[in-house]
Amino acid sequence: MAESLLINFSLNYPGGSSVRVDNLRLAAENAMVTVLFGASGSGKTTFLRVLAGLALPDSGSVSFRGTVWFDGEAGLCLPPQDRNIGFVSQDYALFPHLTVSQNVGYGLSELPRIERNGRVRESLNWLGLEELAERRPAEISGGQQQRAALARAVARRPGLLLLDEPLSALDAPTRRRLRGELHALIERTGIPCLVVTHDPPEALALADEIVLMHEGRILQAGTPSEVFNHPASIEAAQILGIDTMVDGTVTSRDGAIVTVNAAGIRLTAVCHDPISVGCSAAVCIRAEDVMLSLPGSVHGSARNRLPGTVLNAVEEAGLTRIEIDCGFLLRATLTRQSCEELGIRVGTKIEAIIKAPNVHIIPR
Amino acid sequence: MFDWQAVRLTLALAAATAAILFFAGVPIAWWLASTRWRFRAWVEAIVALPLVLPPTVLGFYLLVLLGPRGPVGMALESTFGLRLVFSFPGMVVASVLYSLPFAVQPFTAGFRAVDRRLIEASWCLGVSRIVTFFRVGLPLARPALLAGLVLSFSHTVGEFGVILMVGGNIPGVTRTISVSIYDSVQAMDYASAGWTAGILLIFSFFVLSTMYSLQNRIRTPIWPKAS
């Protein structure tokens, strides 16, 4: 109770759209990451701004670790200055007239000089920015700006870190690298963190808990495997855009070829991310990448052949969505014709075939 | 010949006006740039009035208001023994009002150009609104502040109508360069008028070109380039 974030508010925009959150309780234990996931325009940023004290809801209440931040009835709204938060906006908002180290030290002016300098050095060091300390924001790359903004936010040791699409403005390789650094930073500082994203791999890589938002409402909240494996509605499943997600552990690696153990099943995957043996990872497979054949048919080149049983088959616009139990829940999409030819119905023994490049590994 | 007294007086008037407008105009501009009050447009209109009103209209109202029989004039005279019309302080009051838009408008434009997200970032870093103004708003609006300062100074140097209405033409007390030139022309003394006008022209060009080159040299804050 004490270590949680209680959110309950509604905010109406003049255009008629609104964002409403009813009695959401998020754990705010140390180093806990909650991902706010949804398409753009789903109200994620408004949610974050309400928590930061930058947007004023029409009604409701928000409290963090027992401190009331907002109470619509009492007319109380704590200003951002009094919430002890770290807020990183999508475009970083670094002060262009200050150097990187001045940016990082900006919120520390009440500390004695020696302590302030120590904190700035420590934060710069955590994010590998020592060399860039005297540069201005316009003189460093996007990824470096992102790191500077993170360093500035954590330098104050806030009670809660709010990150709005922290990696979305970056190119893919930088994004993947920073994802790992962000994770390490949260672990190291122990600050609970709320991250807004619309990118499923980012959500999977970072989240201890996922909150799914759609059109200003919360569709579902839970652990990544709950949310990704048991979407509460078709809407939720469509937003997530991943059909099969299973937790796994890397058992071996040979260049880009990675073997993972997922729920006791050995899967071969192709992964270009830095990941070492023993690491845990989310294993994702799209339904249209799964081929099905009857057991004992001719061997092909595909690395992964998983025997299983059909649990469920639902027709949907000429395609059949099939759920297979092969040690974990695997979803496949087939045309109705193939389904009829294979004679697939509930209980059919089947072999699922997945090429290694279609098994996506997301380090966690 | 050349009216040095008038030059000294004009520079003193322009400097006092620009200084007062800086300290009075910056808070007004910061408020105008950040408020969402629905009657803001009225305040903006009042600030801009001197741009459209003939100087004689402003001068007339000031004369009536500040004169020995005007409400403000009477109050000042009975309490402080101060008479504003036909005096240097009176001319400063008139110049401040007349040059108000030349300071407030560039200041406001400068503050509006400061990205709102930077202000919010500062608040989220625990820095109060007022300190945020000094640490983010002021430094980022610096080129606009300098522009407003130059404009209000130069506009006061070139002022004529309001000064003549409120200040009159007392040598050494209220006779500025522009009034002195007018006086010389009235007296058919084209040589003096020519000298004073020429010096004023050269001086104005010198001040403006120095200020503009300074302004160009100040590192214009650039929004960090996107990735």
Image: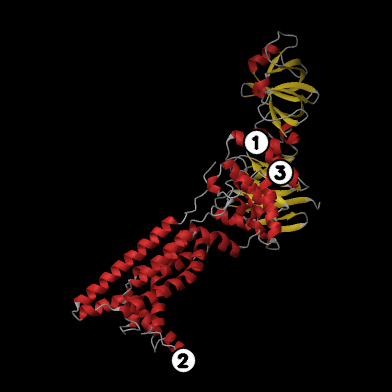
Amino acid type of the residue that numbered disc 3 sits on in the rendered structure: Leu
| Residue type, label 1 | Arg
Picture coordinates of residue A17, whole percent (x, y) = 58, 48
Question: Which is nearer the N-term, disc 1 or disc 3?
Answer: 1
Seen as rendered, the residue at the extreme left is: B188
**Is residue A122 visible from the viewing direction of this image?**
yes
Q: Is B129 or A48 nearer to us in this picture?
A: B129
- Left or right of A177: which side holds A351? right
Dot 3: what SS?
helix
Quarter-of-image position of residue A237: top right
Q: Position of residue A19 (x, y in %)?
A: 63, 49
- Residue A314 visible? The answer is no
Report helix, strand or loop for mark 2. Answer: helix
Read off the residue under disc 2: B78
From mark 1 to mark 2, how far is it between C-alphas?
Answer: 76 Å
- The structure residue drawn at horizontal position 38% and vertical position 62%, both measured from the top left corner, is B210
Amino acid marked by disc 2: Ser
Q: Are marks 1 and 3 in contact (CB under 8 Å)?
A: no
Q: Position of residue A243 (x, y in %)?
A: 68, 28
* Foreground pick, A38 / B102: B102
Front label number (2 vs 3): 3
Q: CA distance from mark 1 to mark 3?
A: 13 Å
Give the letter of the chain under mark 2: B
**Residue on which disc 1 sits:** A177
- Badges 1 and 2, same chain: no
Q: What residue do we see at 78% from left, 22% from top?
A: A265
Q: Is residue A179 left or right of residue B139?
A: right
Q: Chain of mark 3?
A: A
Q: Which mark is residue A185?
A: 3
Would you call the spot at circle 1 few (<14 residues within 10 Å), some (14-19), or many (20 or more)? Answer: few
- When the figure is inspected, residue A171 is found, relative to residue A69, above or below; the finding is above
Q: Residue A312 at x, y = what percent?
A: 74, 23
